Amino acid sequence: MPIATDPLSRIFFALADPTRRAMLERLAAGSATVGELTEPFAMSRPAVSQHLGVLEDAGLIERTRQGRWRSCALRPEGLDDAERWVAEHRAAWQSRFDRLDETLAQLTSGQTPTEEE
Amino acid sequence: MPIATDPLSRIFFALADPTRRAMLERLAAGSATVGELTEPFAMSRPAVSQHLGVLEDAGLIERTRQGRWRSCALRPEGLDDAERWVAEHRAAWQSRFDRLDETLAQLTSGQTPTEEE
DNA sequence: GCATCATGTAGGCAGTTGCTTACGTAAGGA
DNA sequence: TCCTTACGTAAGCAACTGCCTACATGATGC
C-alpha cells in the first residue's frame, strides 16, 4: 500500500487485518484504554498502538486524552464510505447479473440480446 | 499483510487499492480480457495480471479461458462477506451510540445510567 | 521537583507489496 | 510446423507492513 492513499483505500486497508477488526469489535462494546485493548492480544503495546494509529488514520476510531489514560472510541460514521461503496457495487453487480439473466432468457427464446457476452 | 490470511481480510485487502477497485468498476460494465483491463492504466500487463490475481484470490472475480483470450468476470457473491461485515458492524455501532444517547439523556434527567463511560 | 504510570515514537529487522523487464506457455493461423 | 497473439510466471528492486526493543512524553501523586 503506497503512503497517503485515498480515504476509501485507508478504510479498507484498516479493515483488512483480523487484529484491527477484533479491536473494532471490542470497541463496539464500549470505549477502552490502550491497555485494555492490548490485553486480549499476544502483542506488545507499541504494536497495538500502531494498529490503533491505522484505525485512527482511517477515521474509524478517535483517541482522546482522559486524564492519564487515552480513551479509544468508535467513530460510527467512519464506516459510512465503506458501506456505501460495497452496497452500491454489490447492487450494481447483482443488477448486471439480473440483466445477463434477461439476456440469456432472450437468447434462449430466440430474441436478439442488447448486450455483449 | 501476512500471507494466507482469512477470507474477509483478503477481500478487504483486495478492495484497499484504487487500481483494483477501478478494475472491478470496469468489470461491472461487463466481462473483459486482460488486455482490455490493462488499457486504462499506465501500468505493465504483468502488473495488471498480478492485481487480477489478488482479486481472484479474494473471490471477487473469475478468470476463464476463452479461446486465445482470458475472460475476467465479476463474482457478485464475492462481496457478500464484506457487505455483511460492514452492515452488521455499522448497525451495531450506531445502536451503541443510540444507547449512549439514552444514557446521556438519563444522566441529564438525573436517573442512573446502566452503562459505563 | 521527582518517581511512576499510561502511552506514543524511533529504529531495526524479516516478510510482503507493487512495480519493472525478461522469459515461458497455450491457442490460432499461414 | 512455425510465427504471432494473449497471457502468466520468474526474478529483482524500492517501498511498505508488522512486529520487536528501547526511549521519549505527558499526567498524576508524593
Image (cartoon, coloured by chain):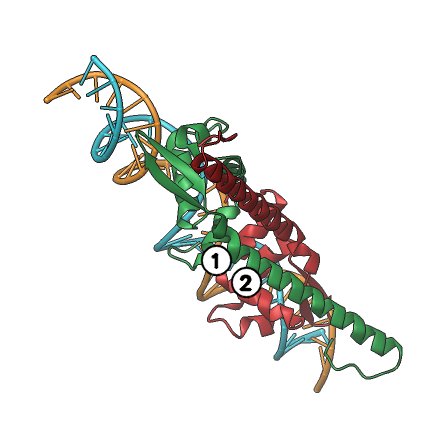
Chain colours: A green, B red, C orange, D cyan
- Residue A49 figure quarter: top left
Contact between labelled residues 1 and 2, with CB atoms less than 8 Å apart: yes
- Judge whether A23 appears above or below D9 on screen: above
Q: Which amino acid type corresponds to the residue marked 1 in the rendered image?
A: Leu
Question: Which chain's residue wears label 2?
Answer: B
Q: Which residue is mark 1?
A: A8
Q: Position of residue B103 (x, y in %)?
A: 49, 37
Q: Which residue is mark 2?
A: B21
| Residue B46 visible | no
Q: Position of residue A33 (x, y in %)?
A: 41, 31
Quadrant position of the N terminus of chain A in the picture:
bottom left
- Residue A67 figure quarter: top left
- Number of marks: 2
Q: Secondary structure at mark 2?
A: helix
Tell us which disc is closer to us: 2 or 1: 1
| Residue A106 visible | yes
Mark-to-mark CA distance, 2 and 1:
10 Å
Q: Which amino acid type corresponds to the residue marked 2 in the rendered image?
A: Arg
